[in-house]
Image: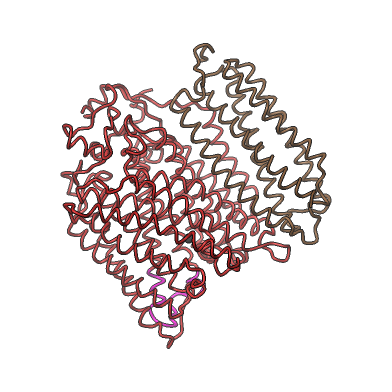
Chain colours: A brown, B red
Amino acid sequence: MAQPAHTLPAHPEKATLEGKNKYLGFWFFLGGETVLFASLFGTYLALRGSTADAPGPADLFHLELVFIMTMLLLTSSLTSVFAVISMKKGSFKGMIMWMWLTVALGLGFLGFEIYEFYEYNHLGLGYTSSAFASSFYSLVGTHGAHVTFGIGWIITLLIRYRKAGITLTNASKFYTAVLYWHFIDVVWVFIFTVVYLLGVGA
Amino acid sequence: MSNSSAAQKSVVWDWLTTVDHKKIGIMYFLAGLFFFTIAGIEAMLIRIQLMFPEMAFLGEQTYNEVLTMHGTTMLFLAAMPMFFGFMNFVTPLQIGARDVAFPFVNSLGFWLFLFGGLLLHVSYFTGGAPDAGWTAYAPLSTTSEGQGVDYYILGLQVSGAGTLMSGINFLVTIVNMRAPGMSMMRMPLFTWTTFVTSMLILFAFPALTVGLLLLMLDRTFGGAFFDIGLGGNVVIYQHLFWIFGHPEVYILILPAFGIFSEVISTFAKKRLFGYSAMVFATMIIGFLGFMVWAHHMFTVGMGPVANAIFAVATMAIAVPTGIKIFNWLLTLWGGRIKFTTANLFALAFIPSFVLGGVTGVQLAMSAADYQFHDTYFVVAHFHYVIIGGSVFGIFAATFYWWPKMFGYRLGEGLGKIFFWLFLIGFHLTFFIQHFLGLVGMPRRVASYLDGQGFNEMNLISSLGAFMMAVAFIFLVVNVIVSRKNTTNVTDPWDGRTLEWATTTPVQEFNFAQTPLIRDLDALWYEKMNGNGKIKAAEPLDEIHMPNGSILPIIMSSGLVVASFGVIYEMYLLIALGLLINFGCMFVRSIKEDHGYHIPVSEIKKQGGES
Ligand SMILES: [Cu+2]
């Protein structure tokens, strides 16, 4: 079932109508996701000063931790780009290797995020402590849920196609998963700016 | 794999697992009609309660529940699904496609909608339906007792997910699956409005998702978004809801605009006047629809600058809408008009909708809105646009596309009785409510006192509602007794667009050979300049079809199980439901399903040769 690499077209992810549909549909889906996160950002911005008696952004956020998390996620986006480059070159091994690296970096990010939430909770910021707390955990938590889903998705693909080679069917699957991963990354850049940088600055 | 395995299965199993856009369209339509009937009965209960002052027909609490369910059901579970039914059935045919882009997702969208709607209605049997109005404003909704509002939140969340998927599916279908020669500017207006409507769904529904999510987090998980004591802010919900809610109004009206464009040009026997202006007006309405949400919040205290900006933006929408009205009038101008039931609804729509538009501009004047706000004037306004626009559109489409969808023509005699009763009943019910509002009757209140000058007008309004109910019975009778009209169902109206070039019933592959489109109004062009048959763009060859799947129903059930977990705060149930859902996604992802092929011999046997 594995096609030899040299017969693959230049854009294997969009070579079939199904692949083309998936590609376009996924872009539309990301458009909807953008509105979803924009709504959460708007809510957060409206409530970020409403700390009640609980700790606020300036008491909690440490840029060192967030910097490490940002680096992990940005690098994981880079490795997923390398995976797509490998795919287009027809190197299945390379693609799989870079995707696993992406997963590892994503898991690292997730670990730090869990640690971060645990730490804030320890410092007295429960989910129900204040409107700021609810909106912070909801925004960052929704992003974290997306990361989790992305990791699960990519691992599923990696295991399912561990020996398949690049085919016209799985090329579009890997490609959309990478698109999703980039999107998560872009959202994080906004979270980094709007939540952490503004939070520490204020 | 061949299609023989598909043919052996039972009829019920076939419909439960179908991924055929035509069957899904029919199921959308019928499910929508079912919910339309329920919401109509709720409307009658409301009008009976308000028939006389201080009636005790429904208690206050029941009134609030019925009112909430009427609005919610009509918008989310009746009007939208019925439009989705037509979109699903007709749009792929109009662009010459074999199916939609994602048949599996299409089926999933339908089952999510249906299960979400049923979940909402379970609340009636478990201690009370939602009672916070269809808008579910916080803190009314966050402090509402019982589980009613939880059912509202989860029911709409589940069905909303389905709507979003369907929207994406239509978008990709229209962009990627058009037949050769079908450029964007040759698409029928109904396909265009499907496209713009889907765009609105895509960008509006996520705001509702977040709004409902915040309500859920506050009610079930102790969030503080709308808890003033902890720094919450209830106006955020209003913004989120209306960022969705105003585009929702256009989601409900644009498909109707598309239907009227088809119906009017067909029955005036003329090409639609100002086609490109119609297309651009649709896009402008869609765009402006996102810029005006705060006109629902003029009295919330945003200040004069914000109010003025949103007022002007709102009034600007009257311009593209006016362009459309004039284009329909000019299409009729000089046409050989046939007064079929479908066309009567289209013709009645024009003045009825203009009335609703005029009161819309009145309401858009933010200073004057302080007087109109939360009175029956608003109720009259939105029923004029939603019945006079969307519902008339649904009925026009019902009579217009019924032969193609169900294989028989609805009776014209009964149809006209239905039309006149409904039209008169509608105006009788709602015209007078403008004046009820102007003399100060507040909306959403279970009763009113004697001697305030409301009595006669309320009685007249209720009588009109009874007339509409009788009219609806005529429609149901029509559907039953007309089943013998099975002649002349392939192209009964001398149609202009591609769906009338298919056989009736439409073959599962729609077109044996992908059609070649040579002009706008593709079929009409061939009737005038060709031999009346659509040219083929490809030689007869075997056709690839997708396999059916039961997974959509299982996935939707999983989400319903998780929803019950949230409603009753049973965390194991949430986990179980999500496990079912993600398990199905996992199975779907790892199982490559390449569908099957219909061989040429089979296509020929089904009469697919043109
Ligand atoms: Cu509005």
Q: Quadrant of residue B470?
A: bottom left
Res. B499 visible in picture: no
**On the rendered structure, is A185 left or right of B517?**
right
Give how far across and how far down residue B244 sits, in percent: 52, 54
Give the residue drawn at x 37%, y 39%: B21
Give the residue drawn at x 52%, y 35%: A26
Q: How many numbered discs, if any? A: 0
Q: In the rendered view, would you say B303 is above or below A155?
A: below
**On the rendered structure, is A123 left or right of B41?**
right
**On the rendered structure, is B264 left or right of A15?**
left
Q: Is residue B53 magenta?
A: yes
Give how far across and how far down residue A127 sits, in percent: 73, 53
Give the residue drawn at x 51%, y 63%: B295
**On the rendered structure, is B318 left or right of A85?**
left
Give how far across and how far down residue A83 sits, in percent: 63, 22
Q: Residue furthest bottom?
A: B451
Res. B551 visible in picture: yes
Give how far across and how far down residue A153 sits, in percent: 61, 32
Q: In the rendered view, would you say B313 is above or below B465?
A: above
Q: Quadrant of residue B100?
A: top left
| Residue range (magenta) | B44-64
Locate the C terminus of chain B by quadrant. Answer: top left
Locate the N terminus of chain B by quadrant. Answer: top left
Query: Of residues B236 and B314, which is closer to you in this image?
Result: B314
Q: Is residue A26 magenta?
A: no
Query: Of residues B459 and B387, which is closer to you in this image?
Result: B387
